[in-house]
Amino acid sequence: MEKKSTVQDMTSGNIIKQIIFFAMPLMLGNIFQMLYNTVDSIVVGNFVGTEALAAVGATTMIVNMLVFFFNGFATGAGVVMGTYFGAKNLEKLHSAVETTMAATFILSVIFSIVGVLGVTPMLNFMSTPEDVMGEATLYLRVYIGGISGLLIYNIGSGILRAVGDTKRPLYFLILTSVINTILDLLFVIVFKMGILGVALATIIAQFISAFLTLRLLTKTDDIYKLTWHDMRVDMHILKKIMLVGLPAGIQSVITAFSNVFVQAYINYFGASCMAGWSCYNKIDQFIMLPMQSMAMASTTFVSQNMGAGKLKRADEGTNTAVSMSFMITGVIATGIFVFASQAVGMFTSDKSVIDYGVLFLRTNVYFLMFNCVNHVLAGALRGRGDSKGPMIIMLGTFVVIRQIYLFVITHFVANTPRIVALGYPVGWVACCILEVTYFIIIRKRLKHQIIKN
C-alpha cells in the first residue's frame, strides 16, 4: 500500500477550506510555542516573585530580536521552496532543503555565541533596574545559550510549511509544551531553582522539538526529505532565500530593537509597571496569533500559486486571509477586553501589576485589528518575492514614527504609562494606511504587465 503524502498543493481547490486547514494547525502550533515563555511567566510570577516576572518580561524583546531575524531567513526559505513546489521543480526543492538546513546549523552557532556575549550590554542599554538585572542576566544567558534548539525547530517546521504540512509540527509542539510545563513546575516548586529552572525547562523542551523535527525530515520518503550526505550550501539558492529573508529579518530585528526603546520608557515607571507590561505583551502575542497564522498561510498560498502562474488565485487567497483574520481577531479582542483582569490575573496576584496590565490591554486591544491588514498583506507580498516593500513600510512606521511619537509626547506633552502604551497603535495605524496603498499599486502594476505581455 502506497504511503499517503503529507504535502498540501494549494494551487487548485477550495481557497477558504485550504487556508483554514493550513492556518488552524499553524495557529495552534504557535499557541503552544508561545506557551514556552508564557508558562515561564506564570510560574515565575506565582512562585518566585514580581522582580523575577519583570526580569522575564525585560528579556523578551532581546530574545525576539534573535528569533525574528532567524524567522526572516525561514520566511525566505519558505517562499523559495513554496515556489519550487508550485512549479513542480522537485530537484530545486530538494537542493533548497539541503541549503536551508546547512545554513541553519552555521547560523545557530553564531547566534548563540553573539547572543550570550551581548546580554549585559543589551540589558544596560534598556535601563534595566538593579533589582531586576541579576535575574534577567541569568535567564537570558541560559535561554540564548540553548536557543539553537528553537531555531532548528523553526526552520524545520518552515520546510514542512512550504509544502503545506502544518499538522506534524503541531504534534511536536503539543508534546514539548507539556514537557516544558512539567519541567517548569518540577525545577521551580520541587527543586527551588527559581528563574534558572524555567530557563532550563524551556531550552530542554526546545531541543526535544528540534530533534523530533530533524528526525522527521531525515526519515521521510516524501519530496522534502533531508539527506545528510547531500547537505551543502547552493549559493544561487541561498541568494534567492536571502533576497526575501534578509529584508524580512532586518525589519523584524529593527522593529524588536525599537521595542527595546519602548521597554526603556516602561522601565521608568518601576518593577510593577514592567511586570504589568510583560503580562500585557504575553496576552497581546496570543491575540495576534490568528493574524500571524493567516499571514504565514498567505505567504505559502501566494508563493505556490505564483510558482504555478496563477496570479488571480493568489489575490483571492490574500483577500480571504485578511477577512478571516479580521473576524477571528475581533472576537478574541472583545473577549480579552471584557475579561482583561482575569487574563492578567493568570500571571500574578499582585494588584498593582494587574492594574497596569489591564490598563495596557484595554488601551490597545482593538487597535490590533489594523495589524490584520499589516501582517497578511506583508505575508502576501513576501509570497510574491517582494520583501523590501513591507520592510521599508514597517520600519518607517513601527520604528521611525513610533519613536518620534514617544519622544515628542513624553518630553513635551505628558509621560504616563497609557501615553507610552499608545506608541504601539500609532505605528500600527500608519503602517496599515501605507501598506494598503502600496499593495494596491503593486497589484495594479503586475496586472498591467500581464495584460501588456
Image (cartoon, helix red, strand yellow):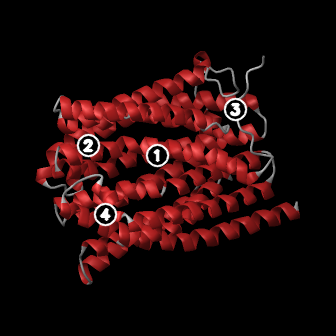
27 displayed left or right of 60: right
What residue would you read off at disc 4? 341
Give the mark nearest the N terminus, 1 or 4: 1
SS at circle 1? helix
Q: Residues within 10 Å of mark 3 (few under 14, many from 20)?
A: many
Distance from label 2 to label 3 (Cα)? Answer: 43 Å
Give the mark nearest the N terminus, 2 or 1: 1
What residue would you read off at disc 3? 93
Q: Which amino acid, by three-letter code, is at mark 1?
A: Ile
What residue would you read off at disc 2? 43
Give the mark nearest the N terminus, 2 or 4: 2
What residue would you read off at disc 1? 31
- CB of mark 1 within 8 Å of CB of mark 4? no
Residue 376 in picture, x, y percent from top left: 60, 59
Q: Nearer the viewer, residue 335 or 412?
A: 335
Distance from label 2 to label 1 (Cα)? Answer: 17 Å
Residue 78 in picture, x, y percent from top left: 61, 41
Q: Residue at x 36, y 66 (%)?
A: 361
SS at circle 3? helix
Nearest to viewer (mark 1 / mark 3): 1
SS at circle 2? helix
Q: Do we see residue 132 in this rendering?
A: yes
Q: Nearer the viewer, residue 207 or 146?
A: 207
Distance from label 1 to label 3 (Cα)? Answer: 29 Å
User: Which quarter of the image is occupied by the C terminus?
Assistant: bottom right
Task: Using the image, tell me which numbered label, if any, was put on residue 301.
Answer: none
176 displayed left or right of 416: right
